[in-house]
Image: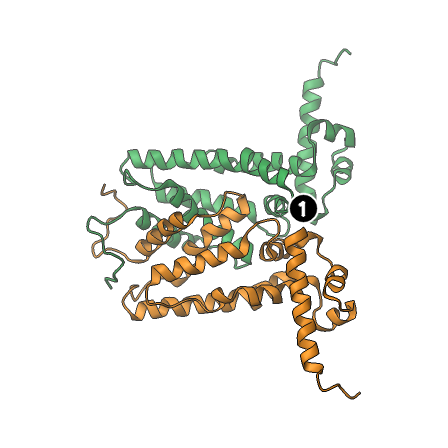
Chain colours: A green, B orange
Amino acid sequence: MVKAPNAPRRRESSRLAVLTATRELCEENGYGRLTIEAIAARAGVSKMTIYRWWPSKGAVVLDLIDEAAAVTADPPDTGDLAADLHTQLSEVINLLTPQPTSPVTGVITEAQYDPDLARALRERLIEPRIAKFKDRLRRAQEQGQLPVDADFDVALDLLFGPIYHRLALHLGMPDPDYLDTLITHVLRALNPPPHRLDGAATA
Amino acid sequence: MVKAPNAPRRRESSRLAVLTATRELCEENGYGRLTIEAIAARAGVSKMTIYRWWPSKGAVVLDLIDEAAAVTADPPDTGDLAADLHTQLSEVINLLTPQPTSPVTGVITEAQYDPDLARALRERLIEPRIAKFKDRLRRAQEQGQLPVDADFDVALDLLFGPIYHRLALHLGMPDPDYLDTLITHVLRALNPPPHRLDGAATA
């Protein structure tokens, strides 16, 4: 079969139309009511076209998130670790809200019932971002902003944990000031004082 | 209508049968496939009986969790804050796993789509437990194990956050040793050294 010369461009334009339609439909109705039929109708492509590139609606939404979550894929490095963490965590909060219509929250929720989607979420989206996050911490370490024995897994859990805790239990997202407070605490946790306090209060 | 003298006892026995059936069905098939019909059949009661006491399957599961989550409802106080936090967080991990069949994880997931269930989850289960958790921290404070200006909201977020972060993104639950590491870091975060380090590394 001979392809028209503009086939790659048409393919890219269809791909973008599908992603745009998916984002709009998520925003309007939430991930739960999203269907491949609705995406196809909104994007002006056939269901066949969608299924040629994506196995499921979850896969479409993962691609959408992958493009939207550019800041977390390539974390900022201005040289100021606390400020950069604030930027990155604010971006994550934006991606997860508003809670009922965020495609990211939709995929996280759906993945609780769908092991294949859970694996794709972890391997395609989360693990590469965790690696980039740890690269950022390593550079901070090289610049003397973190101790040489700082535990990066703990840093990840303590910095991102509060956001998911609040998401899961509907406790409201941190505002910018509280996010500062959290980051200050976590950096203190990662920086042991020269003489340990053995958990005793000093105030 | 005259009630038989043993009506209260029969009511309590039906209530327990419903909760037991709900727990078993969640363990076997997961919260997603749970129905009021299946609960009624397993418990040997009518659907009417269930609907007389509970408006939805989510409400039944909330009652089930409320009884199962006794440790978090009344956190341990042996006088050793770190050890008691370890006990309580281990209990939360047990309640949330195994991930596909835990009723608690099922309710948390379902609540992402159901604002009424989300509100019931937060008001009936979570907020009372947060209040008890803060009472426990206040006693630790009175015993000099936490500084007088320790931020209890930060303590809550940093201690419980990692569990929900790992649950949401399928990163695996903390093992007992790692849980110790997390608690050590959080207690350090809550105990500022006498002279601040201004985020500089000391190692």
Q: Name above or below for residue A198 compared with residue A148.
A: below
Q: Which residue is mark 1?
A: A31
Q: Residue B47 location in percent, x, y?
A: 78, 67
Give the amino acid type for the residue marked by disc 1 in the picture. Answer: Tyr
Residue at 50% across / 42% down in the picture?
Answer: B171
Which element type, helix, strand or loop, lies under badge 1?
helix
Q: Quadrant of the N terminus of chain A?
A: top right
Q: Quadrant of residue B23?
A: bottom right
Q: Residue A115 location in percent, x, y?
A: 62, 41
- Asked whether residue A173 appears in the rendered view, the answer is no
| Chain letter for the residue marked with disc 1 in the picture | A
Q: Residue B2 location in percent, x, y?
A: 78, 88
Q: Quadrant of the C terminus of chain A?
A: bottom left
Horizontal side of residue B21 vs B99, given as left or right: right
Residue at 45% across / 69% down in the picture?
Answer: B132
- What crowding class fits label 1: few (fewer than 14 Cα within 10 Å), some (14-19), or many (20 or more)? many
Q: Quadrant of residue B40?
A: bottom right
Horizontal side of residue A198 vs A60, given as left or right: left
Residue at the farthest bottom position = B2
Residue at the farthest top position = A2
User: How many numbered marks does the figure carry?
Assistant: 1
Residue at 59% across / 56% down in the picture?
Answer: B108
Nearer to the camera, A9 or B141: B141
- Asked whether residue A158 appears in the rendered view, the answer is yes
Residue at 61% across / 61% down in the picture?
Answer: B118
